Image (cartoon, grey):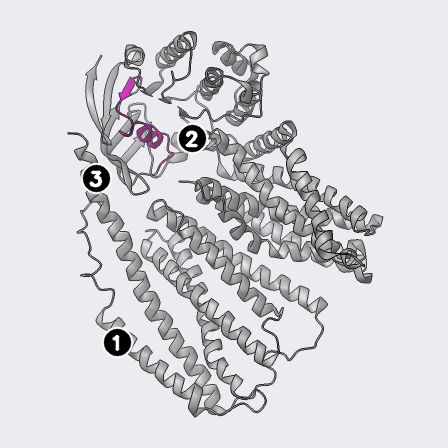
């Protein structure tokens, strides 16, 4: 008659697919956050003028836009939970917090990937950068690995902000310094993918290792830490 | 745990003991001597002139800042993995981080003043400098997490986890900045310590400064930790009064 | 967990909200199978009492165990057997009632037959099931939340103003479900202002006053 604890993986899968379904249904990301990301890319161009500067700094601008967007997406992913206090319902059910963390992170990885595709396309069009097929392979690898790190840190500190109600403003202060290595690594690798300043593809791959280490470390650390940070 | 705490009055409960007051006197005398050594007894550097005197402040503040964060990390770990989950460790971690943030700020200011005089610029994207700035912001965030409210144990758990995450974050930041600079660096400025040759007294002054500032750090953390303990005790003491008031709603 | 353990045992439980003692040394024993009605003024501590039993709030002092599990050390174990319906429904507003049910079905491992039965019980017919929660009335949301509570198959039910926002039919349905759950062996604690209705259900009444529990007798 009694229920048993559901496995961490089932919980993670259920949470992730629920999050993605909500985003698919509500269209908030597409209708509100995506235009924001696009206007940021346009504003960068206004701020920096052009004459070749944009082409040179395009990789950095893409990843800066990703970071800013990630703040919004992370806050949104926890706003869904607190709108009708579903977070409490999940806690009362004794759901393993590692599963919640992994599920939230996986959904974030997927959402960030969508934004990166659009931002790179915008960079190709607005900043006139070039991308070879080899560059595409590098870029996809970089994006996936960078997203794991970004999503893990985002879920961790976003969860902390959501648990301490009314202190969501803490997220940028905690998240941005922590993900600086992702910005550095992903930007340098993207410079290679875009061939900025004559950088070759081969120079980009060592940065992939940095991103992988970051993602692995905080994916694992976050799984352990999430429960403590979100409990009352 | 269920005993009733006497309500501690901040004025009647000093944070000093005989030992810590003695330490305070030693620190004060040490500071006077350091000032004399740094400003008068030591010679100017051949290349840097009097600018080198900034080092007697900058190096000790930077040392104390890093020491503070090591102490915070260690005491956080001791709280998390200690059987008792003793709040004393948590309070030492908090006190140490507060003192550390102050010294990190001082070391950034003295460092950039020194950079202005030596490099001709307040800021260099030097890995050490950049990591230091990140450490500063990270621990400002740590202090904000301590301030989130909730029970003492909850504060200790949350901030303990954040402190331990910072231990992972900072080396990664440093490593990635080093990688970044090593690929893009154009060697156009003087290397930080390359042009200073220290004679015996200068070296002694530097080491003496590190020693005195370490004692200063110890003294500050001791007192601050006791202030935090008193603040927690007032919370707990206030609980008795609040419980009594709550029970009176009965009538 | 031995079957002889009480459903809830609080001894001098203190729960702090910030520095305010919402529960001030509350003591309470609820035997298995009881239906307990909690009454009390706003701010007396009814909701805090329920949230403590659900393992949502830490104990500042005293002792608390639920279904034989010590809340200080075995909170997650206790929570597997505890269901709660609070002021909020805990639903995802962009999803339909059906999708919310499926989400919880997957989290707790309920079969689709169980989910269909439970939805039917709460009067969630197919058109309503496919309506996004955001477009539902307060009563319809409440029913959806109750349908989810039913598939949790909890041993201890904690309900905070369950009748609020429901029409007469919905209120009757809740009473029936609660009686059934009690017959099946569940323990139920209901906080309610509606003494008439909830009192008819209850086997025992307590009142929370100033963060402490006062017995008001057996029905």
Kindly identify which chain the residue marked by label 1 belongs to: B
Position of residue A9 relative to residue A120, above or below, is above
Q: Nearer the viewer, mark 2 or mark 1?
A: 1
Q: Are marks 2 and 1 on the same chain?
A: no
Query: Taking A75 as reference, is C59 left or right?
Result: left
Tell me the quarter of the picture where residue B74 sits: bottom left
Residue C35 lies in the magenta stretch: yes
Q: Which mark is residue B189?
A: none
Tell me the quarter of the picture where residue B191 sits: bottom right
For numbered disc 3, what is the local secondary structure?
helix
Q: Residue at x 24, y 68 (%)?
A: B16
Do the CB atoms of the residues marked 2 and 3 lie less than 8 Å apart?
no
Q: Residue at x 43, y 51 (%)?
A: B145
> Circle 2 sits on which residue?
A92
Q: Residues within 10 Å of mark 2 (few under 14, many from 20)?
A: many
Looking at the picture, tell me which residue is in the foreground, A8 or A69: A69
Figure quadrant of the C terminus of chain A:
top left
Q: Marks 3 and 1, Cα distance to the nearest angstrom?
A: 41 Å
Position of residue B119 relative to residue B36, above or below, is above
For numbered disc 2, what is the local secondary structure?
helix
Q: Nearer the viewer, mark 2 or mark 3?
A: 3
Q: Which mark is residue B243?
A: 3
Residue B14 lies in the magenta stretch: no
């Amino acid at each position: 008659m009694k229920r048993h604890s559901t496995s961490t993986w089932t919980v993670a899968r259920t949470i992730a697919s629920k999050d993605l379904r909500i985003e698919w249904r509500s269209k908030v990301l597409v209708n509100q956050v995506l235009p924001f990301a696009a206007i940021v890319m346009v504003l960068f161009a206004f701020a920096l003028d052009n004459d070749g500067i944009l082409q040179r700094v395009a990789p950095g601008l893409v990843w800066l836009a990703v970071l800013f967007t990630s703040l919004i997406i992370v806050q949104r992913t926890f706003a869904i939970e607190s709108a009708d206090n579903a977070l409490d319902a999940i806690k009362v059910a004794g759901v393993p917090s590692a599963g919640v963390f992994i599920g939230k992170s996986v959904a974030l990885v997927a959402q960030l990937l969508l934004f990166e595709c659009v931002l790179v396309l915008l960079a190709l069009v607005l900043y006139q950068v070039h991308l070879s097929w080899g560059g595409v392979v590098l870029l996809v690898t970089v994006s996936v690995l960078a997203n794991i790190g970004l999503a893990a840190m985002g879920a961790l500190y976003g969860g902390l902000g959501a648990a301490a109600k009314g202190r969501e403003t803490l997220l940028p202060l905690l998240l941005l310094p922590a993900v600086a290595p992702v910005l550095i690594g992903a930007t340098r690798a993207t410079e290679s993918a875009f061939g900025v300043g004559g950088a070759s593809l081969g120079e980009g791959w060592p940065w992939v290792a940095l991103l992988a280490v970051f993602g692995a470390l905080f994916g694992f650390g976050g799984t352990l830490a999430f429960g403590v940070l979100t409990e009352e | 745990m269920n005993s009733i705490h006497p309500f501690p009055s901040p004025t009647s409960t000093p944070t000093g003991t005989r030992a810590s007051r003695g330490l305070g006197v030693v620190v004060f005398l040490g500071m006077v001597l350091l000032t004399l050594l740094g400003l008068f007894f030591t010679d100017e550097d051949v290349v840097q002139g009097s600018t080198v005197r900034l080092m007697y402040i900058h190096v000790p503040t930077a040392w104390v800042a890093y020491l503070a964060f090591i102490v915070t990390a260690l005491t956080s770990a001791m709280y998390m993995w200690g059987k008792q989950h003793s709040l004393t460790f948590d309070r030492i971690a908090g006190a140490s981080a507060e003192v550390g943030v102050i010294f990190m700020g001082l070391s950034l200011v003295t460092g950039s003043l020194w950079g202005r005089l030596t490099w001709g610029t307040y800021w260099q994207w030097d890995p050490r400098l950049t990591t230091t700035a990140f450490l500063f912001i990270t621990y400002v965030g740590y202090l904000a997490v301590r301030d989130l409210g909730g029970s003492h144990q909850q504060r200790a758990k949350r901030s303990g986890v954040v402190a331990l995450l910072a231990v992972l974050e900072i080396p990664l930041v440093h490593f990635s900045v080093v990688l970044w600079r090593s690929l893009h660096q154009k060697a156009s400025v003087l290397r930080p310590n390359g042009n200073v040759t220290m004679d015996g007294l200068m070296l002694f002054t530097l080491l003496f400064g590190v020693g005195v500032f370490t004692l200063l750090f110890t003294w500050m953390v001791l007192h601050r930790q006791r202030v935090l303990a008193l603040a927690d005790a007032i919370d707990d003491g206030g609980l008795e009064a609040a419980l009594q008031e709550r029970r009176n709603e009965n009538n | 967990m031995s079957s002889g353990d009480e459903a809830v045992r609080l001894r001098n439980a203190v729960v702090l909200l910030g520095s305010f003692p919402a529960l001030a040394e509350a003591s309470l024993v609820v035997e298995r199978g009881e239906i307990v009605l909690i009454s009390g003024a706003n701010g007396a501590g009814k909701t805090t009492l329920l949230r403590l039993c659900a393992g949502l709030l830490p104990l500042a002092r005293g002792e608390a165990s639920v279904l034989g599990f010590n809340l200080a050390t075995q909170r997650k174990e206790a929570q597997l057997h505890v269901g709660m319906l609070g002021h909020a429904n805990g639903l995802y507003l962009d999803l339909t009632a059906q999708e919310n049910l499926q989400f919880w079905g997957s989290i707790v491992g309920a079969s689709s037959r169980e989910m269909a039965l439970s939805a039917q019980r709460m009067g969630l017919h197919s058109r309503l099931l496919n309506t996004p929660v955001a477009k539902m009335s307060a009563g319809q949301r409440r029913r959806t939340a109750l349908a989810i509570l039913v598939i949790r198959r909890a041993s201890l039910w904690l309900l905070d103003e369950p009748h609020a926002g429901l029409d007469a039919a919905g209120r009757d349905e809740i009473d029936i479900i609660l009686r059934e759950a009690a017959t099946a062996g569940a323990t139920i604690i209901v906080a309610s202002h509606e003494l008439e209705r909830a009192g008819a259900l209850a086997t025992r009444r307590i009142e929370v006053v100033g963060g402490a529990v006062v017995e008001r007798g057996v029905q």
